[in-house]
Amino acid sequence: MSEKDVVALTEFGLTVMQAKAYIALLAVKEASPSQLCKAIGVVRPEAYRVLHELSAKGLAHTKLGFPVTYSPVDPERALSILTRRHEDVLVSLKKKRKILLGSLSSVRLSDQVLEERFVLIAGGKNAQFRTTEMIGKAKDEYLAVSSKQGLRRWDDDLVRAITSARNRKCNVRVIAEVDGSTTELANHLSRLVRLRTWQPVLFYMDIVDRNQVIFGPAFPAGEEELEHREHDLWTNNPKFVQGMCAMFESLWKISRNYVRRET
């Protein structure tokens, strides 16, 4: 039994035991609880419980008889069922988001929180989310410096936020390190924003309306490093933001206009 497959199935919403039981059923095609308990190393009551859970999720069929046996649905159907469950949860959360946002927005922040000037952001994905949120509220300007690894991580939400900022007549300028792996994205961005290239880029920064900035070292290539990084900093300290704006303008002057390439 592949431990990698077990972990992958847990990411789709199964418990470790449910994942092991489903893979064991795939291997033998049909099994009774007593047969399954030997395959995954659990006692018979636990095997009954896990098989019942798989059946309830639609991932296993129950065959009445003596003894009762279970067979798995095919992997394509199983993954479709699990994916649809996540999609349903997402739809439900989006419906609840507006109500919760109104409720939380009515809570008055303490003066201490309002005066906070520097915030350390743990986790690269949280930093990306913070950047997307900042761009979504931009009124006049968005400035960015990105390494090639960082550019590869510009997801659809961030690109949509930039597109929306441009539609609001925001001035958007980006300095990026571009190579063969990011040419397609760079070509697309160059149609939306003023894009220049510079390399190597060993850091990133995002400045919105010249009153807040988020920055840190260049994004790593690995997902694990991205998830556990603790080096990103947000600030609205006026002097610090002013200094970062000056750095951006200096880089802008010495960088080169991006010329779209064939992909």
Image (tube, rainbow, N blue to C red):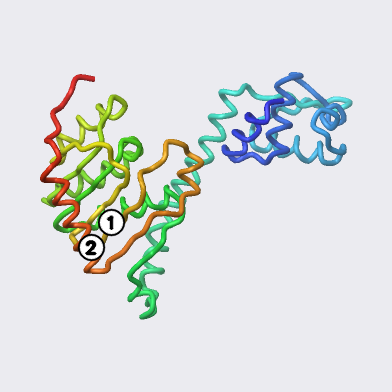
- The amino acid on which the numbered mark 2 sits, given as a three-letter code, is Val
Task: Please state which of residues 54 and 67 is positioned toward the viewer in this rendering.
Answer: 54
Q: Is residue 77 above or below residue 193?
A: above
Q: Is residue 148 above or below residue 132?
A: above
Q: Left or right: 188 with respect to 149? A: left
Mark 1–mark 2 contact, CB under 8 Å?
Answer: no
The picture places residue 105, in percent across and down from the top left corner, at: 36, 69
User: Label 2, on which residue?
Assistant: 241
**Residue at 20% over, 29% down:** 187
Mark 2 packing: few (<14 Cα in 10 Å), some, or many (20+)? many
Q: For the residues marked 1 and 2, what is the alpha-carbon distance in whole angstroms?
A: 14 Å
**Residue at 14% over, 51% down:** 249
Q: Left or right: 87 with respect to 189? A: right
The image quarter containing residue 234 is bottom left
The picture places residue 180, in percent across and down from the top left corner, at: 28, 24
Q: Is residue 93 above or below residue 222?
A: below
Q: Left or right: 143 with respect to 132? A: left
Task: Please state which of residues 155 and 178 is positioned toward the viewer in this rendering.
Answer: 178
- The amino acid on which the numbered mark 1 sits, given as a three-letter code, is Met
Task: Please state which of residues 152 and 68 is positioned toward the viewer in this rendering.
Answer: 152
Element type at mark 1: helix
User: Label 1, on which residue?
Assistant: 134
Point out the tag, 1 or 2, that comes first from the N-terminus: 1
The picture places residue 248, in percent across and down from the top left corner, at: 18, 51
Q: Is residue 140 above or below residue 167?
A: below
The picture places residue 98, in percent across and down from the top left corner, at: 37, 59
